[in-house]
Image: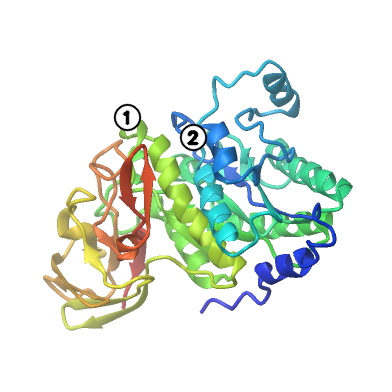
């Protein structure tokens, strides 16, 4: 059971900015960066965000780590990053999920009346083609990220502004799936959150914990040894660890899995529009953190065996549940499987009623592994041919995003999972 996050950050903002009539220059800076490997850096995602439009659309409330509006100059070292800015080199200025995230949060804060008193500082950190150990505390990537947070804090401090890091967005795991770099990913990711939480608090002196808003990596088929009917599937360990932290730790909340999106060449990196779409969902998650109403996304809440049937009850953010084969190409049994210790998928059919799924099997599923989105074509990712499933909620009926004149429903899609049932 997730514990309630006790501090409402919007109340902190209100308390600090309540004297705006006396001191109109006082502001609160909410720093919400993204960190991870290449997906966090937007690798291969052609940029669709116009920075001038982003600035005007958000009433100039979205800023970089320098608290300015000079986006798009990330590099692996501070010196290279500075050089890129000096020469205006934006050749590798990709679309980032946090641009969409910032748009959503800025619109929400404006609606709540905080639009003129709150800035959102967001920027990417991390390192491409890296396992979690290669970007954790003690590495150059981690220290650069921390230094940028410290630099933003100091700039805010010099202006007499309050500075809080309520959350960071996590996008890493692909290397650990493919190359087996982490031996215990759940432990490693939790330790990263603990370290960053401690180090950020030492910088900002904030009492609020730093929440990890985590996506889910779904690139199982990029592993050359992946077999969807293998009872002991090492590839599912990383996405399952992300699920278990979201469901069991109050300092982890969900944004969404990657399988509903388009990937460049159907391989490793989601494209620009997909970064934007995931960013909007991330923004909704951050808003829930700010309002102390964090959600866990669309995930199973309870498993029960009844004869030859597995009953899975879901906590549904926005009912009803839907098996959608239009937005995502149909996967066998809508993405579900029940694999026994003999490496055999015993699932026959799937039946959905309300928020309960019934998985009818050929034999008793006791001792088998119930899986979702553990499938796909070799070396493929995404909603057409990669590991995927067809289960979503109905949030998109009321919440949508318009990107390049096309409307995208903001549904919550079920996270990939792999659970032993008895």
Badge 2: residue crowd in 10 Å (few <14, some 14–19, many ≥20):
some
Query: Comparing marks 1 and 2, which lies closer to the viewer?
Result: 2
Query: Which residue position holds label 1?
Result: 265
374 relative position to 330: left or right = right
Res 170 visible: yes
26 relative position to 408: left or right = right
Residue 303 x, y percent position in the rendering: 32, 78
Query: Which residue position holds label 2?
Result: 49
Question: Which quadrant is the C terminus positioned in?
Answer: bottom left
Badge 1: residue crowd in 10 Å (few <14, some 14–19, many ≥20):
few
Residue at the spot 22% in from the left edge and 61% down from the top edge: 337
Quarter assignment of residue 364: bottom left
Residue at the spot 29% in from the left edge and 37% down from the top edge: 380
Res 339 visible: no
Give the secondary structure at mark 1. Answer: helix
Residue 219 x, y percent position in the rendering: 37, 44
Q: Is residue 316 above or below residue 391?
A: below
Residue 62 x, y percent position in the rendering: 63, 44
408 relative position to 14: left or right = left
Q: Using the image as rendered, state which of residue 350 and residue 202 is in the foreground.
A: 202
Residue at the spot 26% in from the left edge and 38% down from the top edge: 378
Q: Residue furthest bottom?
A: 306
Q: Is residue 254 above or below residue 53?
A: below
299 relative position to 182: left or right = left
Quarter assignment of residue 17: bottom right
Q: Residue furthest top?
A: 87
Give the secondary structure at mark 2. Answer: loop
Residue 415 x, y percent position in the rendering: 37, 60
> How many angstroms separate mark 1 from mark 2 (CA)?
21 Å
Q: Using the image as rendered, state which of residue 127 and residue 85 is in the foreground.
A: 85
Q: Which mark is residue 303?
A: none
């Amino acid at each position: 059971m997730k514990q309630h996050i006790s501090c409402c950050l919007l109340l902190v903002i209100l308390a600090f900015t309540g004297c705006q009539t006396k001191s109109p220059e006082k502001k609160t800076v909410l720093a919400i960066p993204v960190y991870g490997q290449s997906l966090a850096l937007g690798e291969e995602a052609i940029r669709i965000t116009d920075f001038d439009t982003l600035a005007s659309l958000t009433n100039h409330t979205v800023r970089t780590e320098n608290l300015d509006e000079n986006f798009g100059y990330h590099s692996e070292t501070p010196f290279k990053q500075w050089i890129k800015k000096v020469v205006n080199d934006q050749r590798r200025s990709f679309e980032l999920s946090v641009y969409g995230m910032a748009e959503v949060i800025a619109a929400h804060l404006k609606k709540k009346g905080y639009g003129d008193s709150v800035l959102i500082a967001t920027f990417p950190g991390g390192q491409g083609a890296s396992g979690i150990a290669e970007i954790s505390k003690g590495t150059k990537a981690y220290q650069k990220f921390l230094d940028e947070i410290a630099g933003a804090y100091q700039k805010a401090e010099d202006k007499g502004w309050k500075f809080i890091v309520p959350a960071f967005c996590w996008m890493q795991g692909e290397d650990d799936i493919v190359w087996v770099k982490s031996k215990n990913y759940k432990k490693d990711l939790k330790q990263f959150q603990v370290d960053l939480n401690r180090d950020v608090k030492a910088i900002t002196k904030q009492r609020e914990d730093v929440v990890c808003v985590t996506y889910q990596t779904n690139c199982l088929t990029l592993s050359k040894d992946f077999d969807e009917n293998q009872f002991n599937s090492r590839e599912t360990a990383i996405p399952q660890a992300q699920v278990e932290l979201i469901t069991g730790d109050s300092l982890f909340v969900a944004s969404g899995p990657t399988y509903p999106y388009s990937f460049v060449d159907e391989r490793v990196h989601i494209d620009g529009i997909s970064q934007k779409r995931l960013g909007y969902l991330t923004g909704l998650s951050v808003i829930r953190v700010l309002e102390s109403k964090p959600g866990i996304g669309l995930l199973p809440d309870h498993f029960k065996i009844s004869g030859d049937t597995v009953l899975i009850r879901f906590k549904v953010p926005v009912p009803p549940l839907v098996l959608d084969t239009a937005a995502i190409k149909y996967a066998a049994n809508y993405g579900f499987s029940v694999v026994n210790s003999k490496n055999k998928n015993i699932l026959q059919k799937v039946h959905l009623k309300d928020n309960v799924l019934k998985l009818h099997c050929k034999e008793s599923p006791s001792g088998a592994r119930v899986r979702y989105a553990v499938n796909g074509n070799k070396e493929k990712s995404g909603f057409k041919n990669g590991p995927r499933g067809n289960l979503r909620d109905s949030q998109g009926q009321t919440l949508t995003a318009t990107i390049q004149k096309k409307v995208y429903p903001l549904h919550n899609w079920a996270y990939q999972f792999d659970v032993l049932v008895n």
